[in-house]
Amino acid sequence: MIEINNESAIDVDETVLQRLTDFNLAQLHVSPDAEVAIVLVDEGAMEALHVQWMDEPGPTDVLSFPMDELRPGTEDRPTAPGLLGDIVLCPQVAETQAQAAGHTLMDELILLTTHGLLHLLGFDHAEPDEEREMFGLQKELIQGFAAAERRR
């Protein structure tokens, strides 16, 4: 189950984030019954979370809060349902990054949501090999979702 709450002042197409998360969970062989919450917040709320949880000043683009420490499954052994966790996005920060990268806010939110979901599933990018794996998988998922969206 995917729950999306937009508490930010920016209007976002939540149905795209819903389809993206469904797609990513299917690709990663995680039960569609796994629970994920996606919350979009303004800069003030994001900065408060960033300071509280990461001890870093200023708002950030995405934070992930894993719950049951679920990991990706395989085709033969999908991950059982459970509480995957929360992804918190800040559309204002994402908008600035989207402009700098030369793409849309939605493209940036797709990237950040996928990144956040991978963190919920135990991926990290602290070490070079971890970063290669995580960012490679992230790129693959985003390209696969884009192709699926074109077929809609």
Image (cartoon, rainbow, N blue to C red):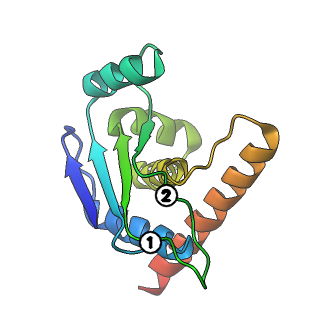
Q: Which residue occupies the foreground of this view, 100 or 111?
A: 111
Residue with the mark numbered 2 = 70
Q: CA distance from mark 2 to mark 1?
A: 8 Å
Q: Where, by quadrant of the figure, is residue 71 drawn?
A: bottom right
Q: Residue at x 50, y 80 (%)?
A: 148
Whichever of labels 2 and 1 marks the residue nearer the N terminus, that label is 2
Along the line of sight, which residue is nearer the eye, 71 or 126? 71
Callout 1 secondary element: loop
Is 78 rendered above or below residue 123?
Answer: below
Residue at 44% of width from left, 13% of height from top? 57
Q: Which residue is mark 1?
A: 80
Q: Quadrant of the C terminus?
A: bottom left
- The reply to whether the C-beta atoms of the residues labelled 2 and 1 are less than 8 Å apart is yes
Q: Which residue of the protein is positioned furthest toward the right in this rendering?
A: 129
The answer to whether residue 24 is above or below residue 128 is below
Element marked by disc 2? loop
How far across and how far down the image is residue 77, in percent?
57, 79
Q: Amino acid at mark 1?
A: Ala
Q: Quick check: 85 left or right of 45?
A: right
The one of 140 and 84 positioned closer to us in this rendering: 84
Q: Nearer the viewer, residue 26 or 106?
A: 26
